[in-house]
Amino acid sequence: QVQLVESGGGLVQAGGSLRLSCAASERTFNNYAMGWFRQAPGKEREFVAAITRGGSSTYYADSVKGRFTISRDNAKNTLYLEMKKVKPEDTAVYYCAAGRHYSHHSDYGNYDYWGQGTQVTVSS
């Protein structure tokens, strides 16, 4: 069982920056592909970004490409999401997730473990 705890959410003005973190309990953190998803009120959960086990490959939703950066520190069992030039439409609860898959990183059904989420609110 992998426990994931997100942090770093909050209120930020449009155009600003925010860094989310996700701490994993699992010592074999590097055995898991990791992803960030988000869910806005009244909307379905959507893929934001993903990273492979060693961090060599990253994937992004078109809506965040060029503004968000996903990274991981396997020595610290921690996943990050650097958010820049945020927009009001980025407002959502952000979830980190861990999975044993090797492809289809944007498919939330491939992820086995989820954090409780952290709220990000972007004011205009």
Image (cartoon, grey):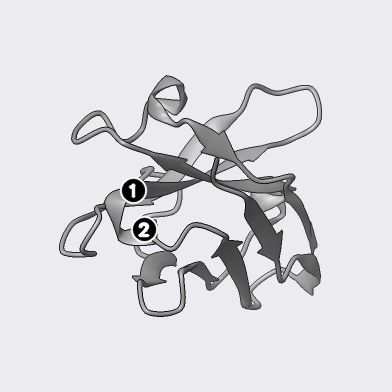
Asked if the residues shown at circle 1 and circle 2 are in contact, with their CB atoms under 8 angstroms apart, the answer is yes
Crowding at mark 2 (Cα within 10 Å: few <14, some 14-19, many 20+): few
The quarter of the picture where residue 85 lies is: bottom right
**In which quadrant is the C terminus drawn?**
bottom right
Q: Nearer the viewer, residue 84 or 26?
A: 26
- When the figure is inspected, residue 73 is found, relative to residue 70, above or below; the finding is below
Q: Which residue was labeled with disc 1?
A: 32
Crowding at mark 1 (Cα within 10 Å: few <14, some 14-19, many 20+): many
Mark 1 or 2: in front is 2
Type of amino acid at the residue the image marks with label 2: Thr
**In which quadrant is the N terminus drawn?**
top right
| Residue 93 rendering spot, x and y as whole percentages | 73, 45
Q: Nearer the viewer, residue 25 or 16?
A: 25
Alpha carbon separation for disc pair 1 and 2: 8 Å
Q: Residue at x 19, y 36 (%)?
A: 102
| Residue 74 rendering spot, x and y as whole percentages | 35, 72
Q: Residue at x 37, y 79 (%)?
A: 75
Q: Residue at x 39, y 59 (%)?
A: 29
**Secondary structure of the residue carrying numbered label 2:** loop
Q: Which residue was labeled with disc 2?
A: 28
- When the figure is inspected, residue 70 is found, relative to residue 60, above or below; the finding is below
In this picture, residue 100 sits left or right of residue 47: left
In this picture, residue 105 sits left or right of residue 25: left
| Residue 106 rendering spot, x and y as whole percentages | 36, 33
